Image (cartoon, grey):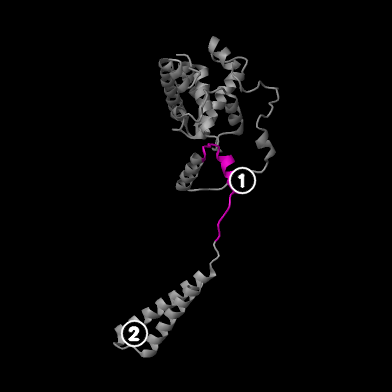
Amino acid sequence: MPLYPHSAAYASEHGEMEQYNASFQASHACKEAIEQAISRHYSNNRLDAEAAVNDVLERFGPDRVQYVLANTVRHKEWDGRISRDSKAWASTMPLPEGAPQDRHSEYLVVDRCNPGLTDLFLKQVRQLAGERESPLSGRSCKRLRRLPGALPRPGRKRRSVDMANREREIQLKFRVTPEERELIEAKMAQLGTQNMAAYLRKMALDGYVVRLELPELREMVSLLRRSSNNLNQLTRRVHETGRIYDADLEDLRQGQENAAGRRTGA
């Protein structure tokens, strides 16, 4: 099954939905195969990346495997467990127009395994692309080598394609709860962005914090708290002695009048 290179909108407009759907189903099966291969070949805190990659490449071929991996990395640009090198590679890979914003591409994200393991899997795919003697056979090996973003062969220097990240040398990290992360992602969705690093940097530099200075309100709350404490003391005294004194009532009344006066003056 060849990899369909266009979006669903293009396929619909040109009467090619059958080819699109068939390719999409194959890509989804490839995504699940990657997840299963990683799970199957991971044990004792170690991933046998070569065995995992060979399992998937034999079934789906290098074009579809790299397409699914590039789509996954594009959707996880914010994830620090995926290397910058892999993100730079994914940015060079041709994807159908509209991806990764296209909602269909979300179903092709490898997300049932640790992103760090997915990154190791991807590096092994790219390593095979850069080897002179690849364990892959014939046509698949040649096609894999021709794809952009392959790792360079030993002895060659790799030019950086991520100029923005190179200019920003200081990395900041902070922790959030799952609920806070969901809230951040919801706000990102409202802005139509999937680049968490860019979003957080923009908010940190250009966002604002509202700080309310209301001294009158704090003083009124303090007076009300004192009046409440006095009322509680009077109630306890009545329960204990069965009596209440006019002076105590006058103190309580004055406290309430002071609080009311503060509120009116504010």
Residue position for label 1 = 172
Q: Is residue 137 visible?
A: no
Q: Which mark is residue 81?
A: none
Q: Residues within 10 Å of mark 1 (few under 14, many from 20)?
A: few
> How many other residues sit within 10 Å of disc 2, few (<14), some (14-19) or many (≥20)?
few
Image coordinates of residue 193 in percent, x first then y, are: 53, 37
**Which comes before the other along the chain, label 1 or label 2?**
1
- Residue drawn at x 37%, y 86% is 249
Left or right relative to 159: residue 142: left
Q: Which label is found at residue 237? A: 2
Q: Secondary structure at mark 1?
A: loop
Q: Amino acid at mark 1?
A: Leu
Q: Residue furthest front?
A: 264
Q: Is residue 206 magenta?
A: yes
Confirm whether the magenta stretch covers residue 80. no
Q: Residue at x 40, y 87 (%)?
A: 250
Q: Is residue 4 left or right of residue 204?
A: left
For the residues bearing labels 1 and 2, Cβ distance under 8 angstroms: no
Rendering quarter of residue 124: top right
Q: Name the one closer to the observer, 89 or 234.
A: 234
Question: Could you tell me residue 32's position as x and y percent?
Answer: 42, 26
Is any atom of residue 178 visible in this view?
Answer: yes
Which region is colored magenta? 191-211
Q: Amino acid at mark 2?
A: Arg
Residue 245 sits above or below residue 223 on the image? below
Residue found at x 56% / y 48%: 174
Q: Position of residue 158 (x, y in %)?
A: 68, 26
